[in-house]
């Protein structure tokens, strides 16, 4: 005879947290646009959850908003490589069954995160790169767009400045570390993450960072929670930053302690700076960074909080 059981819905909070990458020297007028963009992305993710969408739908939806926003280093607004071209990395993961999809060094598409999700859902693989990823995009009916549509005046100036100031590619930790990402917890207790980036300015052609690498750029497991990271890709890869933060959750640490331990390890071991957002399976969340600042926004139970610097958090109710 089957064991007796009782069923009921799990009483979990809906949570979405997004980040807009580590950054320094954000001018006052740009700060307002960044605030507006990051809040819009979190609201989009939350509205998807509120309408009954899954965590994976919410993180994809939030990241699409940021990929379309030229203020952020992902999709349109991506930083340029040493040849002045855009090569983008993205990954996504569903904590329900650990299914994951990633793409790297993709060009001429509007939303790399959509392609990463298609890799997850429509192929037997986790990760497609370069030419193969672009062929898969075409097979899936994703339109190719002119590279100019992804390049902004700001990203052109950024590359010029970097080349003038620093010359060739550097091995040390750069100051502008952009990436966008989202984590979410849905009403069924599923967590997910999505991360997308143009990488690091003046990078070598073909350089792939942490963002498309499962465990480094993000991780999601319903038993633990979900993380999306930002910062110096070469450092994040070496410490597996997202999985490291969840390891500390596994060891019984709070979300705050886990994020701090993981980021401090990367800083002390490699002088690597960055940030992460984490939501636990019980809906506790944190946004933490060792870079100069990190635009972030979170919505939990209809309350939106957002910030860029440690000194400032804005709060409002969503209706
Ligand atoms: N372990 C080799 C591969 O899966 O590509
Ligand atoms: N974290 C983004 C990159 O290094 O590409």
Image (spheres, rainbow, N blue to C red):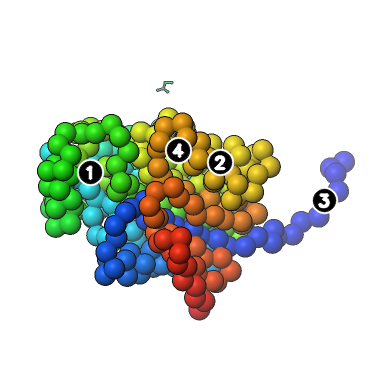
Q: Is residue 33 left or right of residue 263?
A: left
Within-10-Å neighbours for mark 2: few <14, some 14–19, many 20+: some
Within-10-Å neighbours for mark 4: few <14, some 14–19, many 20+: some
Q: Which residue is mark 1?
A: 201
> Counting residues from the N terminus, which is met first, the one under dot 3 or under dot 1?
3
Nearer the observer: mark 2 or 3; the answer is: 2
State how far apart marks 3 and 1 are (Cα): 56 Å
Q: Are marks 3 and 1 in contact (CB under 8 Å)?
A: no
> Counting residues from the N terminus, which is met first, the one under dot 1 or under dot 2?
1
State how far apart marks 4 and 2 are (Cα): 10 Å
Identify the residue at image location x=76%, y=56%: 7
> Counting residues from the N terminus, which is met first, the one under dot 4 or under dot 1?
1
Q: Are marks 2 and 3 in contact (CB under 8 Å)?
A: no
Identify the residue at image location x=30%, y=34%: 172
Q: Which residue is mark 4?
A: 267
State how far apart marks 3 and 4 are (Cα): 48 Å
């Amino acid at each position: 005879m089957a064991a007796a059981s009782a069923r009921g819905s799990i009483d979990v909070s809906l949570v979405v947290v997004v980040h807009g990458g580590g950054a320094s020297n954000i001018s006052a007028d740009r700060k307002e646009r960044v605030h507006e963009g990051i809040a819009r992305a979190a609201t989009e993710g939350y509205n998807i959850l509120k309408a009954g969408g899954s965590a994976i739908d919410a993180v994809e939806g939030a990241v699409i908003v940021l990929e379309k926003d030229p203020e952020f280093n992902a999709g349109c607004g991506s930083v340029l490589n040493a040849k002045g071209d855009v090569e983008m990395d993205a990954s996504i993961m569903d904590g329900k069954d650990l299914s994951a999809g990633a793409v790297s060094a993709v060009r001429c598409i509007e939303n790399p995160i959509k392609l990463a999700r298609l890799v997850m859902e429509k192929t037997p693989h986790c990760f497609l790169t370069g030419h193969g990823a672009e062929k898969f995009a075409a097979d899936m009916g994703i339109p190719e767009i002119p590279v100019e549509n992804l390049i902004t005046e700001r990203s052109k100036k950024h590359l010029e400045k970097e080349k003038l100031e620093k010359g060739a590619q550097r091995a040390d930790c750069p100051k502008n570390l952009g990436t966008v990402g989202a984590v979410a917890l849905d009403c069924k207790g599923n967590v997910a993450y999505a991360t997308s980036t143009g990488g690091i300015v003046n990078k070598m052609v073909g350089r792939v960072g942490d963002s498309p690498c499962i465990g480094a750029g993000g991780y999601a497991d319903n038993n633990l929670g979900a993380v999306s990271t930002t910062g110096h890709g070469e450092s994040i890869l070496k410490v597996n930053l997202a999985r490291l933060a969840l390891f500390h959750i596994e060891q019984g640490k709070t979300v705050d302690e886990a994020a701090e331990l993981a980021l401090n390890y990367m800083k002390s071991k490699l002088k690597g700076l960055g940030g992460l957002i984490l939501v636990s399976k019980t809906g506790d969340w944190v946004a933490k960074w060792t870079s100069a600042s990190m635009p972030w926004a979170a919505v939990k139970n209809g309350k939106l909080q957002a910030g860029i610097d440690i000194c400032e958090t804005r709060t409002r109710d969503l209706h």
